[in-house]
Image (tube, helix red, strand yellow):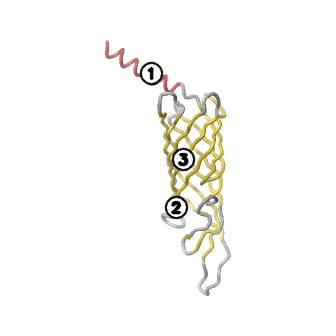
C-alpha cells in the first residue's frame, strides 16, 4: 500500500508539472541566420513542438562564399521545418532547452566563375534542399506571453551540392498567441 501511495504522488507530481505548461501557438522574429519569421506549434504537454521558419538564407554571413564551381553572389530565401524536443531547466519552468531536426529548402543566386571560353557567367537562381538541425534555449519572461531565445544549428545540403554545410545561429523573440 505504501508503494502505491508513493507511486501515486510521483505520477500526480509529474502530471502537475506538465499541466502548468499551457502554450499552444507562438509567433516570433529571428535575427541572425536565418533572419525572418518563426511560427511554433506546441504539442502534448509542451515537451514537443514544430517550428516553421521563413526568411533569408545567407543574409548575415555566407553572403559571398565559394559554392560548387563558383560562388554565391547574394542572399536568398529559405523555408525550414523543425520538429523539436523541449525540456524545462530548473523548477520555475521559465527556461527551456530544445533540440530538433527537419528539412530546409533554399532559393538563391549562384554564379559559376567562368564558362569554358573563360567568360564570366550571369547569376542563375537555383533551389537547394537538405536536412537541418538545431539546439537552443528559450527564456519565458515572467508575467507576460513573451519569450526570448537563442539557437544554433546546421544545414547540410543534399541537392544540388552533396554535403555543402551552412551553420545557422540566431536569436529572437516569440509571443504566445493562444493558450490551451
**Residue at position x 59%, y 57% in the image:** 105
Give whichever of 148, 124 is nearer the camera. Answer: 148
Q: Nearer the viewer, mark 3 or mark 1?
A: 3
Q: Residues within 10 Å of mark 1 (few under 14, many from 20)?
A: few
- Give the distance between the C-alpha atoms of the residues marked 1 and 2, in whole angstroms: 44 Å
Relative side of 162 to 124, left or right: left
Determine which residue is flagged by label 2.
Answer: 157
Q: Is residue 22 above or below residue 120?
A: above
Work out which quarter of the rendered image holds the N terminus and state it: top left
The structure residue drawn at horizontal position 65% and vertical position 62%, both measured from the top left corner, is 75
Give whichever of 180, 140 is nearer the camera.
140
Residue 61: image quadrant is: bottom right
Horizontal and vertical percent for residue 175? Answer: 65, 37
Q: Earlier in the sequence, mark 1 or mark 2?
A: 1
Q: Position of residue 83 (x, y in %)?
A: 52, 44
Query: Dot 3: few (<14), some (14–19), or many (≥20) neighbours within 10 Å?
Result: many
Q: Secondary structure at mark 3?
A: strand
Q: Which quadrant: the C terminus?
A: top right
**Mark earlier in primary sequence (3, 2):** 3
* 28, above or below 14, in the image: below
Indicate the quadrant where residue 23 lies.
Answer: top right
Reply above or below: 35 against 161. Answer: above
Q: Is residue 17 above or below residue 30?
A: above
**Residue 35 at x, y = what percent?**
64, 52
Q: Which residue is disc 1 drawn over?
A: 13
Q: CA distance from mark 3 to mark 2?
A: 19 Å
Amino acid at each position: 500500500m505504501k508503494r502505491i501511495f508513493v507511486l501515486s504522488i510521483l505520477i500526480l507530481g509529474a502530471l502537475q508539472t506538465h499541466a502548468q505548461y499551457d502554450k499552444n501557438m507562438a509567433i516570433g522574429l529571428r535575427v541572425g541566420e536565418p533572419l525572418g519569421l518563426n511560427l511554433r506549434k506546441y504539442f502534448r504537454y509542451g515537451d514537443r513542438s514544430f517550428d516553421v521558419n521563413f526568411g533569408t538564407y545567407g543574409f548575415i554571413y555566407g553572403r559571398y562564399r565559394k559554392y560548387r564551381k563558383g560562388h554565391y553572389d547574394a542572399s536568398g530565401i529559405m523555408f525550414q521545418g523543425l520538429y523539436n524536443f523541449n525540456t524545462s531547466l530548473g523548477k520555475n519552468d521559465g527556461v527551456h532547452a530544445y533540440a530538433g531536426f527537419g528539412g530546409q529548402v533554399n532559393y538563391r543566386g549562384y554564379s559559376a566563375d567562368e564558362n569554358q571560353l573563360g567568360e564570366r557567367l550571369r547569376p542563375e537562381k537555383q533551389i537547394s534542399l537538405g536536412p537541418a538541425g538545431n539546439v537552443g534555449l528559450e527564456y519565458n519572461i515572467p508575467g507576460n506571453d513573451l519569450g526570448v531565445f537563442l539557437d544554433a544549428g546546421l544545414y547540410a545540403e543534399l541537392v544540388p551540392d552533396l554535403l555543402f554545410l551552412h551553420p545557422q545561429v540566431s536569436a529572437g523573440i516569440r509571443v504566445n498567441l493562444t493558450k490551451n
